[in-house]
Image (cartoon, rainbow, N blue to C red):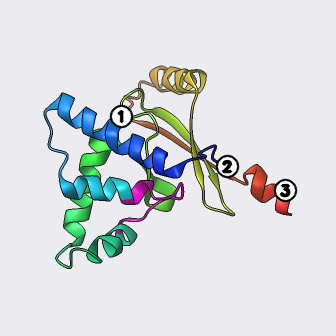
């Protein structure tokens, strides 16, 4: 489903963007925050918090769930990752801080997730919220189905 042809470059770009964003905001991009973001970007499949913890424990046996959750909160708050609520998992943001009105195509066969953006969809949701006097905090749409690669296998 992804068009990534050089995954190492994909991960490197994400870490470099995160480093620049943290510098611009005066935030510390600690070794732990970097490692958690790197784990999330290891594949284009969603990463669950306890899977991240298991990977961290390979190098740091003192890693605990609260540490992972605090780190995930930091990455979320700064637009570096997205939470896929239906899966209770996280994916890297391919364009941090540009916008928050994303939607996700989730392949229920291979579990890959594609981040998509469409201002028309976001405006329709904002318009509906405004008509209903609803104050938006965040817009996240999750669309499940099969990617072309998995659909072609059947």
Magenta span: 39-49
Q: Which mark is residue 152?
A: 3
Image location of residue 85, percent across then percent down: 46, 54
User: N-terminal of the two: label 3 or label 1?
Assistant: 1
Q: Residue at x 52, y 20 (%)?
A: 127
Asked if the residue under mark 2 is in contact with the one under mark 3, i.e. CB atoms within 8 Å, the reply is no
Image location of residue 65, percent across then percent down: 24, 70
What residue is pinned by disc 1?
137
User: N-terminal of the two: label 1 or label 2?
Assistant: 2
Few, some or many C-alpha atoms within 10 Å of disc 3 (few <14, some 14-19, many ≥20)?
Answer: few
What residue is pinned by disc 2?
1
Q: CA distance from mark 3 to mark 2?
A: 12 Å
Residue sitting nearer the eye, 6 or 142: 6
Is most of the magenta stretch helix, strand or loop?
loop
Q: Is residue 142 above or below residue 152?
A: above
Element type at marker 2?
Answer: loop
Residue sitting nearer the eye, 94 or 12: 12
Mark 1 against mark 2, which lies toward the viewer?
2
Residue 136 quadrant? top left
Element type at marker 3?
Answer: helix
Element type at marker 1?
Answer: loop
Few, some or many C-alpha atoms within 10 Å of disc 1 (few <14, some 14-19, many ≥20)?
Answer: few
Confirm whether the magenta stretch covers residue 125: no
Q: Is residue 95 left or right of residue 73?
A: right
Q: Residue at x 26, y 33 (%)?
A: 20
């Amino acid at each position: 489903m992804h068009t990534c042809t050089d995954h190492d470059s994909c991960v490197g770009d994400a870490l470099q963007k995160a480093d620049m964003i943290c510098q611009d905001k005066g935030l510390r991009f600690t070794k732990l925050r970097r490692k958690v973001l790197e784990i999330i970007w290891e594949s284009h499949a969603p990463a669950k918090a306890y899977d991240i913890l298991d990977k961290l424990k390979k190098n740091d046996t003192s890693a605990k769930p609260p540490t992972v959750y605090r780190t995930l909160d930091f990455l979320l708050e700064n637009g570096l990752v997205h939470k896929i609520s239906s899966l209770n998992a996280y994916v890297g943001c391919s364009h941090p801080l540009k916008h928050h009105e994303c939607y996700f195509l989730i392949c229920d066969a291979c579990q890959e997730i594609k981040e998509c953006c469409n201002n028309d969809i976001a405006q329709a949701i904002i318009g509906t919220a405004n008509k209903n006097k609803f104050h938006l905090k965040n817009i996240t749409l999750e669309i499940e189905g099969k990617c072309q690669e998995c659909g072609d296998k059947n």
